[in-house]
């Protein structure tokens, strides 16, 4: 196996073959959109006999941490062909991508998972639960005037991408810079629909919904949406409600700002009546994205917390180092640090006898710092241990809103 930077002319056909084998693309149109997907960002291939058999693609962006913007290296795809599975190709290639992201100045990395466990080996920790809401738009109680939207198609991808980048910001929100990859995602949408309003500065797209219209009566699945204000969110809900004479089910990730159940009429009665049916109305949950710190010093210098300050020794383990071949400039974050968390926070190499000690994997530490779960919870289920007084003070200083990306990738 040898690792190389992707070269479109040399590698595209082999990469398209890998994606086809994985069942991610089928026809020529979908293959063409793969070119858009790979156009911007950092792509690596691992070759066997000179042909790409494994490919990873990273793409730059930002993630919100309270009022700060962190530099994000998103891992947008990891694929291994059918002939080199379970030989360590994916782990080694993804580890190399992380090393390159760290060297390029990224603070954190994130990805969507196919299952829990695999990316843990690269130091990723599981993110927040996301609520998936299947609801009948006729049961929406939103009372907001409906206004005819404009139709949107993949040709409007720049408008949608700009609206995503300009949407309202809260803790955890992700923005991805590559408009071309956004276009690819739109082109890959089956039976697409898109509606939006051009109320932004200079008549730009301000709020929209985009997704798959699976069947005459639904489910319609909203895969992407953006809005900047409370009124725009309510207008989108009014738009969804306007489809109710025909569409029986809408499925989507809950808008992170609100509890959708607040806006549904008799949700338990509807759930009972639709149970196990084609249009089951139910809210289900799973944690399908993962996240890790790449640059501890930088992340902590951007951490401003309102609780009482805490200072401690951190003994950090990082499993990624096992998968990095040859000495790399960045080879994970294993080591000993003195951490301060408070209004001004920091991470410095060293240990002090006067301070309590926290032992943690980078996976668990990233989760705690991002606000996915408090220290006391991770001390039960993840690799994080310290004395009770330290755990209690970490719980107090890290009282963060639960992070949600608001952008699937
Ligand atoms: C996922 C995928 C990229 C792995 O590729 P690969 O090159 O075979 O992976 P590696 O050889 O580096 O690692 C395989 C190891 O991970 C393990 N693994 C796989 N899923 C796991 C899980 N959920 N939890 C823990 N370990 C897991 C395997 O058992 C194997 O273990 P071993 O090293 O002890 O034998 C490949 O199966 C693939 O392309 N799948 C289809 C596309 C896909 O889902 N991509 C991921 C998108 S998030």
Image (tube, helix red, strand yellow):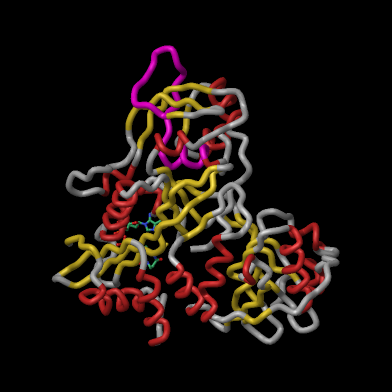
Q: Residue at x 62, y 35 (%)?
A: 399
> Picture coordinates of residue 310 (x, y %)?
53, 23
The magenta stretch spans residue 8: no
* Front-most of residues 186 and 396: 186
Q: In terms of image quarters, where does ligand 1 lie? A: bottom left
Q: Is residue 364 magenta?
A: yes
Looking at the image, residue 252 sits to the left or right of residue 55; the answer is right
Q: Is residue 130 left or right of residue 154?
A: right
Residue at image position (61%, 39%) is 400
- Which residue of the protein is positioned furthest toward the left in this rendering? 49
Extent of the magenta region: 347-369
List x then y, in percent, for residue 368: 52, 38
| Image-based side of 383 in relation to 35, left or right | right
> Residue 209 appears at what percent x and percent y?
64, 71
Q: Residue furthest top?
A: 354
Q: Residue at x 68, y 69 (%)?
A: 199
In which quarter of the view is residue 358 placed? top left
């Amino acid at each position: 196996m040898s690792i190389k930077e992707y070269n479109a002319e040399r590698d595209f056909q082999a990469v398209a073959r890998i994606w086809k084998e994985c069942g991610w693309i089928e026809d020529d149109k979908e293959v063409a959109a793969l070119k858009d997907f790979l156009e911007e960002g950092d792509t690596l291939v691992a070759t066997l006999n000179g042909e790409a058999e494994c490919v990873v693609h990273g793409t730059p962006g930002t993630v919100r941490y309270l009022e700060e913007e962190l530099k994000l290296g998103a891992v947008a795809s990891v694929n291994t062909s059918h002939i080199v599975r379970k030989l360590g190709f994916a782990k080694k290639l993804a580890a190399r991508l992380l090393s390159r992201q760290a060297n390029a100045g990224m603070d954190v990395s994130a990805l969507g998972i196919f299952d829990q466990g695999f990316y843990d080996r690269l130091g990723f920790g599981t993110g927040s639960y996301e609520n998936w809401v299947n609801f009948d738009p006729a049961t929406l109680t939103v009372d907001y005037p409906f206004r005819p939207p404009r139709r949107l198609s993949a040709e409007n991808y720049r408008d949608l991408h700009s609206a995503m980048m300009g949407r309202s910001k809260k803790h955890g929100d992700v923005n991805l810079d590559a408009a071309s990859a956004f276009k690819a995602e739109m082109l890959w949408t089956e039976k697409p629909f898109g509606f939006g309003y051009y109320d932004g500065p200079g008549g730009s797209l301000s709020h929209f919904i985009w997704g798959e219209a699976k069947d005459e009566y639904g489910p319609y699945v909203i895969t992407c949406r953006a809005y900047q204000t409370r009124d725009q969110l309510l207008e989108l809900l009014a738009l969804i409600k306007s489809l109710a004479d025909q569409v029986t089910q809408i499925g989507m990730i809950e808008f992170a700002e609100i509890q959708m159940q607040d806006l549904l009429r008799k949700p338990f009665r509807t759930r009972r009546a639709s149970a196990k049916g084609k249009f089951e109305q139910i809210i289900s949950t799973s944690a399908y994205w993962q996240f890790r710190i790449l640059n501890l010093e930088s992340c902590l210098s951007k951490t401003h917390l309102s609780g009482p300050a805490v200072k401690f020794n951190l003994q950090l383990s990082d499993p990624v180092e096992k998968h990095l071949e040859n000495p790399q400039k960045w080879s994970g974050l294993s080591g000993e640090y003195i951490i301060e968390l408070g209004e001004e926070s920091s991470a410095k190499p060293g240990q002090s006898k006067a301070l309590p000690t926290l032992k943690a994997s980078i996976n668990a530490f990233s989760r705690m710092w991002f606000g996915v779960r408090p220290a006391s919870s991770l001390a039960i289920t993840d690799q994080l241990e310290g004395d009770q007084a330290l755990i209690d003070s970490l719980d107090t200083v890290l009282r963060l809103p639960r992070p949600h990306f608001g952008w699937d990738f």
